[in-house]
Image (spheres, grey):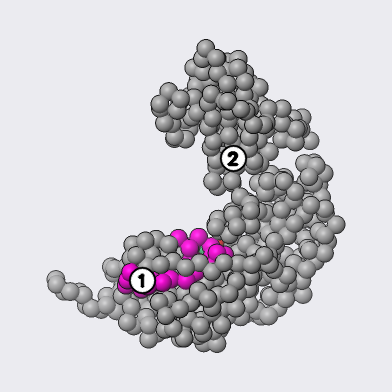
Amino acid sequence: MLNAEKIKKEFPILSKGLIYLDNAATTQKPYQVINSMKDYYENYNANVHRGVYRIAVEATEKYEEAHRVIAKFINALPNEVIFTKNTTEAINLVAYSLGMKLKKGDEVVISLMEHHSNFVPWQQICKLTNAVLRIIPIDENGNLKDFEKHINKNTKIVSITHASNVLGTINPVKEIIKKAHEVNAIAIIDGAQSVPHFDVDVKDLDCDFLAFSGHKMLGPMGIGVLYGKQEILKEMKPFIYGGDMIKEVNINDTKFNEIPWKFEAGTPNVSGAIGLIEAVNYLKRLEMNNVFSHTQQLIKYFLETSSEITNLKAYGPKEKNGLVSFKLGRLHPHDMSAFLDELNIAIRGGHMCAQPLVNFLGEAAVARASFYVYNTKEDVDKLVKGLKKVKGVFKV
Amino acid sequence: MDIHMENILDHWRNPRNSGIMKDADIIFSDSNPLCGDEIKMQLKVKNNNIKEVKFLGRGCSISQAAADLLSDYVKDKNLNDIKNIKNEEMIKMLGIEIGPVRIKCALLGLFALKKGIYLKEGIKMEDSNLNGQITN
Ligand SMILES: Cc1ncc(COP(=O)(O)O)c(C=O)c1O
């Protein structure tokens, strides 16, 4: 296991006894990330790609370095990395740019376990274009059911989450991508819950797009990533127009800048990109395989120690990525999490922005504990103790 | 544990007024999509007074206990008086501090009740019309 005790000390917010177990929503930030952003604002804050004075050059270099660091982290080329606000914006970029070309009869394939951010854009684009939205169902174990059956010669886009934020399921995306390519469909992967937890190699996966959020992997809020294969990006239309994304503007027409800049219109989130460099460096120092096995052990430990709590029901497949969703009798997750909050334990309760999935589970809301590099077995002990208390008080 | 919280849990575990009402004069269901709380208020009315109240619902302890407490509170009350119940009165019945996140849970039953009464008069009420009453 990672030395989480020591790692915790590098996260200022965790120095006051907070047991933070809502990491699938957003992770906390180490001082390295916080300080790098402070350093930018205190010492070289300037707009990028514009000025010729020193701090403008320094800011520009750092912003471009961020593209290189992220590219290397996922085995892409720097010009294949587009900075967005978050996963949601990254998916919308593709949905608007490529999705709007869909025609009646074309098909888009997603799954029942998508986060709303990979569900609603496609649902709405399909309404606008009269394309058909196909939803891969899931089985009772929380795995995708017969995905091949839903991909056919009419399929133009397949957009699937790599790992579920409710069930923890890791989907066989490599096979799904292969199947999508067999019918010449574009394959998009929602990596919001995978990139923070294990090595994701876009060349190995052969996905056409990968979207993820900096804030779920120790980075700041407001910076996300869209990876796209360069040959596709070059042909793609921009999604947002304005400054920075142009090469030349005339009264009648505009020549767009090269990739990735043609997709990054307007002043970007430079401090966010700088913070993200440090977040990635932090994870690289820990090594992603250690990150993965650390949370694996915490999950295992939680499932073991909570098994004596009768009426506690965990959802999802046996193998889970980073989190466990559960219910305790008829207790509403909001009651549970409000009670645990009194004990300084933060867990999530609700529909997790995956309403179609949670409804499929027969619930309106579930509780979720999600782990990361600074969580210790002691944190899990406290959670389990807290759950026993909740059970006693509510008598469920 | 705080006695008010104890009281809420008691109403949540053993609601006094929950059940199905046959031949109700007013029925209104409302839900809180964010947390999935659901309340259905059922009333029997005579001469503009509430004769009987029952609710059906599922959700968190606050939403369910509030509906139960409210059902007791409005029995024999005049429909017009119910329309004037202030949101603060509901919170007072619960007796605990309700933060901004749980306020919707606390008021779900009251809103369902008021919406049902207004609808009977042909007026469609939205949360936003009733929310304004928080500061009344
Ligand atoms: C699987 C998955 N996809 C997408 C998102 C959306 O991420 P963001 O809110 O950063 O755009 C999340 C975050 O909750 C997620 O868990």
Between A314 and A20, the one nearer to me in the picture: A314
**Quadrant where the image shows the N terminus of chain A:** bottom right
Q: Residue B95: give x, y in percent of width and height.
A: 67, 28
Q: Amino acid at mark 2?
A: Glu
Residue A62 lies within the magenta run:
no
Q: What is the CA distance from the residue labelled 2 to the residue labelled 1?
A: 38 Å
In the shown orientation, is residue A162 left or right of residue A84?
Answer: right
Residue B5 visible, this angle:
no
Q: Is residue A93 magenta?
A: yes
Residue at the spot 58% in from the left edge and 74% down from the top edge: A146
Q: Are marks 2 and 1 on the same chain?
A: no
In the picture, measured across the screen, residue B96 lies left or right of residue A354, that is right
As helix, strand or loop, the secondary structure at mark 2 comes to strand
Residue drawn 68% across and 80% down? A289
* Residue A126 visible, this angle: yes
Badge count:
2
Q: Position of residue B90 (x, y in %)?
A: 60, 27
Q: Which residue matches tag 1?
A: A105
Q: Quadrant of residue A367?
A: bottom right
Residue B17: image location, x then y, percent: 68, 27
Which residue is more in the foreground, A272 or B61? B61
Q: Nearer the viewer, residue A339 or A47?
A: A339
Q: What is the three-letter code of the residue carrying label 1?
A: Gly
Q: Nearer the viewer, mark 2 or mark 1?
A: 1
Q: Residue at x 66, y 22 (%)?
A: B72
Tell me where the magenta segment starts and ends, as one range: A92-120
Local SS, label 1: loop
Where, by quadrant of the figure, is residue A163 drawn? bottom right
Q: Residue B38's mark? A: 2
From the viewer's perspective, is A193 left or right of A187?
A: right
Q: Is residue A67 above or below residue A295?
A: below
